[in-house]
Structure formats: C-alpha cells, structure tokens
C-alpha cells in the first residue's frame, strides 16, 4: 500500500470514529459533517491497491449509517492500515 492511500484510509477511519462518537452523544450535526468527510475520502482511495474486503467495506459506507457500523468500519480500516 502506498503512503498516500495509507493516509487517506487513516483519515477515513478517524472520520468514521467521529461519526460514531457524534451519533452516540446525540450530536447528529457533528456526525453528519464527519460522515460527509468520510464519503468524500472514500472516493480518494485507490481501490486497486487495497484488499478486496476493504473494497466491500468501503462500498457499505453511505449516508445511512448507524453508530455501531461506523465504529466497526473505523476499527476494521484502522487495523488494515496498521498491518
């Protein structure tokens, strides 16, 4: 994985974690803002250089996401980047 893709995925994981925190705290405005950032970052990922399961995971990130899914996706992406 190249450095640019790694940074994008790390940022995406952080955005999703903030979505989960915002939804958990009841701050839908905060969650929505970071969800928009996550969706924007998703389009920056060079899909040809990531694992197939990450491509599937990224395809599930949409405007309708709950806090559990956002936290799970964040953790899975973060673990992928670290390994």
Image (cartoon, helix red, strand yellow):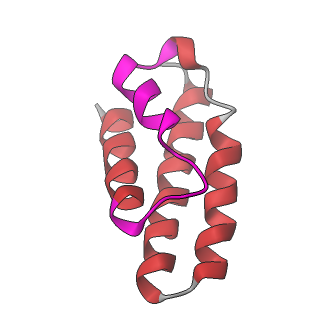
**How far across and how far down the image is residue 76, in percent?**
32, 43
Q: Residue furthest bottom?
A: 26
Q: In the image, what residue occupies the spot 44% across and 76% down?
A: 21
Image: 48 above or below 40: above
Boundaries of the magenta span = 49-68
Q: Quadrant of the C terminus?
A: top left
Residue under the image location 54 percent in, 11 percent down: 48
Residue 82 screen position, x and y as percent: 33, 37
Snapshot quadrant of residue 66 = bottom left
Percent x, y of residue 42:
62, 38
Q: In the image, is residue 52 part of the stretch drawn in magenta?
A: yes
On screen, residue 43 versus residue 11, left or right, reads right
Q: Residue furthest front?
A: 64
* Callout count: 0
Q: Residue furthest top?
A: 48
Q: Residue at x 47, y 50 (%)?
A: 13
Estimate the x, y position of residue 67 in percent, counting from the top left: 40, 68
Residue visible at 39% across and 41% down? 77
Residue 51 falls within the magenta-colored stretch: yes
Give the image quarter of residue 81. Answer: top left
Q: Nearer the viewer, residue 66 or 55?
A: 66
């Amino acid at each position: 994985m190249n450095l640019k893709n790694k940074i994008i995925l790390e940022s995406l994981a952080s955005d999703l974690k903030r979505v989960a925190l915002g939804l958990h705290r009841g701050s839908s405005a905060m969650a929505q803002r970071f969800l928009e950032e996550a969706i924007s970052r998703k389009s920056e990922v060079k899909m040809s250089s990531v694992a197939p399961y990450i491509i599937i995971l990224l395809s599930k990130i949409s405007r309708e996401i709950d806090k559990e899914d956002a936290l799970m996706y964040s953790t899975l992406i973060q673990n992928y980047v670290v390994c």
